[in-house]
Image: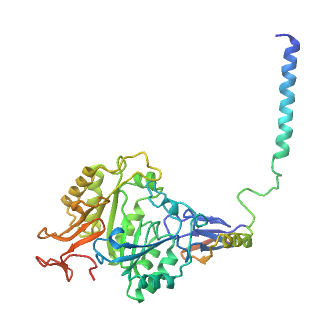
């Protein structure tokens, strides 16, 4: 009789039959045991500015050794990495990179952090955790860019070896998550609360997609939820959508829409808001919530000026949350 | 329409029905009495060989449970 396994890594709880794979395409039931097929087999390796993840409150102007494997447990219509996230590992060009080799490469390339990114690190969980343990022992930070679609127990194990997480807070309605990503909202809300509870540095990204999640009401509700449940000091990046993957029919997000979202977020009480994917916009900068002065001036991912000293505004001595050294 | 035409049409339809029935019977999978929900075990050696051929390796995953051994 054929075996049947239930995967408990993410809220999908895929029931996987003999020889079959989970929704993520990279976890397989072989003879009644679950295996990951992407351990040590990344298909994307880059050295990026940490600001690209985006992390604006973590080690500014440093490089992050960024990796990803094939697969993903979401299926977002706008995915910019769909060639790797929406394909099984047989259809991506993978390289051999053991956890030790990944850490050695980060050190060799003077990267202060390792970023688990591009697809979604939830689906290469075991690989990410093993690299993280080694990196931590060498004083290298571990940072994640994720949709946050993960169960509590694995998330807590991950938080113990992770320094910063940027969660894609895609929208504030279940309908949006279902329609855009074939997922649900509630587990993502729980994940963000768990990350905060563990004291892992948290930044959020909201990709504003015309006609999907750009209503002022939705943006206000999203910001309010953040303030009420995570705190006003959690940075929120509004990111500009570009036509991509299954949404090539839509226009790019108007700059005015992003500026309005920024205003709503500030009005709802969020201290640190940003507009992403518009390199020369003033909302790329970090401003002191106390005296309004520019703390970190950026153009694109490049830091031009940094006025945070010892984790404080150098002008008024206000403590600025983040990981600055 | 003449009676002979009607007879012709009836015979044509009847013979077509019989022909389709015979073809259908030949391509229908053999009924074994096994319910569709129960599938025989997959050859795990073949699965592993396929994975290896693709340049991948298997690594034990975490966070799962066995529903049916």
The residue nearer to you, when weighing A171 against A299, is A299
Residue A85 position in % (x across, y down): 51, 63
Image quadrant containing the C terminus of chain B: bottom right
Q: Is residue B47 left or right of residue A204?
A: right
Residue A195 position in % (x across, y down): 36, 73
Q: Is residue A68 left or right of residue A240?
A: right
Q: Residue at x 53, y 67 (%)?
A: A70
Q: Is residue A249 left or right of residue B37?
A: left
Q: Is residue B17 left or right of residue A224?
A: right
Residue A5 position in % (x across, y down): 62, 69
The figure's colour scheme reads: rainbow
The residue nearer to you, when weighing A15 against A103, is A103
- Figure check: A65 above or below B30: below
Residue A283 placement: quadrant: bottom left
Residue A18 position in % (x across, y down): 68, 67
Q: Residue at x 26, y 76 (%)?
A: A322
């Amino acid at each position: 009789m054929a075996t049947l396994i239930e995967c408990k890594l993410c809220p999908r709880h895929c029931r996987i039959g003999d020889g079959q794979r989970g929704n993520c395409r990279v976890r397989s039931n072989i003879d009644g045991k679950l295996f990951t097929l992407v351990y040590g087999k990344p298909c994307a390796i880059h050295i990026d500015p940490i600001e690209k993840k985006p992390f604006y409150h973590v080690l500014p102007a440093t490089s992050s050794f960024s990796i990803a494997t094939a697969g993903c447990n979401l299926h977002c219509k706008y995915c910019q990495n769909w060639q790797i996230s929406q394909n099984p590992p047989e259809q991506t060009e993978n390289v051999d990179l053991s956890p030790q080799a990944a850490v050695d490469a980060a050190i060799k390339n003077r990267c202060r952090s390792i970023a688990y990114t591009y697809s979604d690190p939830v689906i290469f969980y075991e690989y990410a955790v093993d690299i993280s343990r080694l990196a931590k022992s060498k004083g290298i930070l571990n940072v994640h860019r994720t949709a946050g679609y993960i169960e509590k127990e694995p998330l807590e194990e991950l938080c113990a070896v992770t320094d910063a997480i940027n969660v894609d807070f895609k929208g504030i309605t279940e309908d949006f998550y279902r329609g855009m990503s074939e997922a649900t909202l509630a587990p993502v809300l729980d994940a963000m609360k768990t990350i905060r509870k563990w004291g892992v540095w948290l930044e959020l990204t909201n990709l504003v997609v015309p006609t999907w999640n750009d209503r002022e009401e939705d943006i206000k509700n999203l910001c309010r939820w953040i303030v009420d449940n995570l705190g006003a000091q959690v940075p929120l990046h509004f990111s500009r959508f570009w036509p991509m993957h299954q949404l090539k029919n839509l226009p790019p997000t108007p700059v005015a829409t992003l500026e309005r979202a920024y205003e709503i977020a500030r009005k709802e009480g969020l201290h640190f808001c940003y507009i992403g994917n518009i390199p020369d916009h003033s909302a790329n900068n970090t401003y002191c919530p106390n005296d309004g002065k520019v703390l970190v001036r950026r153009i694109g991912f490049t830091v031009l000026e940094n006025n945070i000293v010892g984790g404080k505004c150098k002008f008024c001595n206000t403590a600025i949350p983040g990981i600055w050294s | 329409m003449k009676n002979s035409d009607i007879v012709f049409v009836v015979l044509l339809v009847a013979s077509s029905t019989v022909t389709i029935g015979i073809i259908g019977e030949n391509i229908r999978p053999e009924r074994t009495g096994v319910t569709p929900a129960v599938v025989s075990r997959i050859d795990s050696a073949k699965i592993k060989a396929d994975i290896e051929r693709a340049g991948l390796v298997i690594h034990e995953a975490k966070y799962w449970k066995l529903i049916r051994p």
